[in-house]
Image (cartoon, grey):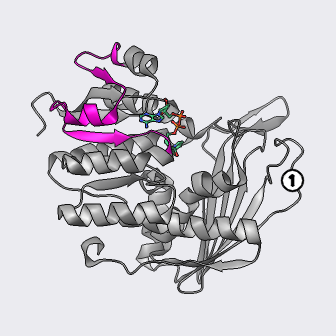
């Protein structure tokens, strides 16, 4: 297990998120060090490894995990590559923090649930970092306190400056709205029963063929209604907001990051360009909590079940996107293992 030098982490995938997690583990997180990086692009892994003492570059994630130098794995490769990396990590009985989506669909997510249950103990945490954002945590505490009564509705907005080339309608749900899906399940403490996707008039600023923005209606098991605006090309920054409407009050988060500046007859503030800046503190807290729990021999945070449940809701969302109308979420029975 973790030596005195700290938990030796292999970071799989060193693109935008992976490189940021490598920086975080190296510079911000205590009790961990980057022991290995793996990327199918050899130069990307090599140049990153060269900046960190004792870090080895691999092109095969499996080779990094088999090296004997690694105590834990952080997966930040693209979603379709997650299943293979998770299976390798479970094969070596290594704790994993896997970026969302755990896997891209329910069939592969169910295979991961089965593999983890066969191992006999939980090893997987899924990277739904909003659960570590200070404002989301306060909102959750307020809802759980019962002070405002039951939550009846949740309004959520998720706006991006622009999406990378090749971003599809489907990815607006599976890659972006998956965060609101997990936030909803976590905040309201219940599963989502049905999804309806509406496509308003598309912005002329999105690539041709992309239906952007989209409006998603989630119905929870208790009948609470949750709407999500996903807007991939709002053009002014990255903005994530939520408002819970409860029996005895409402709570809004994400309105202002501050500071508010007044000058030249105007007032205003800064809208972050992307999630790396907006959720920097949440990623830090997420990774630190994962490292701390792993060193104690525990697994905390969103589980493989949460990864599967999000995939099931997103699958229903994609079906509604394609065929129109309301689509029920088909969820397997929750194993006691994930109680
Ligand atoms: P990216 O495309 O910038 O980087 C992916 C990297 O993985 C590339 O360097 C690529 O060469 C490498 N790669 C591809 N296949 C691989 C394989 N089989 N094994 C090892 N490396 C492989 O992608 P990005 O934006 O960094 O996303 C990575 C993951 O992080 C995705 O699962 C994505 O959904 C998630 N993500 C999570 C966010 C969050 O807020 N939690 C925000 C953005 C992304």
Q: Left or right: 206 with respect to 219?
A: right
x, y (%) of residue 312?
Answer: 52, 69
Residue furthest out toward the bottom: 222
Give the extent of the magenta segment.
Answer: 49-78
Compared across the picture, whether 206 is left or right of 336 comes to: right
Residue 176: give x, y in percent of width and height: 61, 52
Determine if the magenta segment contains residue 63.
yes
Q: Which quarter of the figure has residue 186? A: bottom left
Picture residue at 63% right of the left edge, 56% below the top: 241
Q: Secondary structure at mark 1?
A: loop
Residue 61 belongs to the span the image colors magenta? yes
Residue for point 82% across, 43% down: 206
The N terminus lies in which quarter of the figure? top left
Mark 1 sits near ligand 1, with its Cβ under 8 Å away: no
Does the rendering let one see residue 9? no
Name the spot of residue 299 as percent of width and height, x first.
24, 56
Horizontal and vertical percent position of residue 268? 74, 38
Residue picked out by circle 1 = 202
* Nearer-the-camera pick, 139 or 119: 119
Which residue: 57% across, 61% down?
180
User: Pointer 1: residues within 10 angstroms few (<14), some, or many (20+)?
Assistant: some
Q: Is residue 99 above or below residue 268?
A: below
Q: Is residue 169 left or right of residue 3?
A: right
């Amino acid at each position: 297990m973790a030596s005195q030098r700290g938990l030796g982490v292999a970071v799989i995938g060193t693109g935008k998120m992976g490189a940021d997690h490598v920086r975080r583990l190296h510079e911000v997180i205590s009790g961990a060090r980057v022991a290995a990086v793996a990327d199918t692009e050899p130069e990307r892994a090599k140049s990153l490894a060269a900046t960190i003492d004792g870090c080895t570059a691999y092109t095969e994630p499996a080779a990094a995990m088999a090296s004997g130098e690694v105590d834990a794995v952080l997966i930040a490769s693209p979603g379709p590559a997650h299943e293979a990396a998770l299976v390798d990590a479970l094969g070596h009985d290594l704790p994993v923090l896997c970026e969302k989506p755990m896997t891209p669909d329910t069939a592969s997510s169910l295979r991961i649930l089965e593999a983890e249950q066969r191992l006999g103990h939980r090893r997987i945490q899924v990277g739904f970092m909003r659960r570590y954002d200070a404002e989301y945590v306060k909102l959750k505490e307020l809802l759980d306190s019962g002070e405002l009564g039951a939550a009846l509705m949740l309004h959520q907005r998720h706006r991006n400056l622009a999406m990378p080339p090749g971003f599809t309608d489907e990815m607006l749900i599976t890659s972006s709205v998956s965060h609101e899906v997990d936030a909803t399940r976590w905040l309201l403490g219940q599963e989502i029963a049905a999804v309806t996707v509406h496509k308003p008039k598309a912005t002329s600023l999105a690539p041709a063929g992309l239906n952007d923005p989209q409006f998603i209606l989630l119905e929870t098991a208790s009948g609470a209604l949750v709407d999500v605006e996903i807007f991939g090309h709002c053009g002014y920054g990255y903005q994530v907001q939520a408002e819970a409407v409860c029996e005895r009050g409402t709570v809004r988060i994400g309105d202002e990051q501050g500071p508010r500046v007044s000058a030249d007859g105007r007032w205003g503030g800064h809208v972050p360009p992307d999630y790396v800046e907006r959720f920097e503190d949440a990623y830090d807290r997420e990774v630190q909590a994962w490292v701390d729990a792993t060193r104690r021999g525990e697994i905390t945070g969103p589980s493989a079940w949460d990864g599967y449940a999000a995939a099931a809701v997103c699958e229903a969302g994609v079906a509604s996107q394609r065929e129109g109308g309301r689509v029920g979420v088909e969820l397997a029975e929750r194993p006691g293992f994930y109680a």
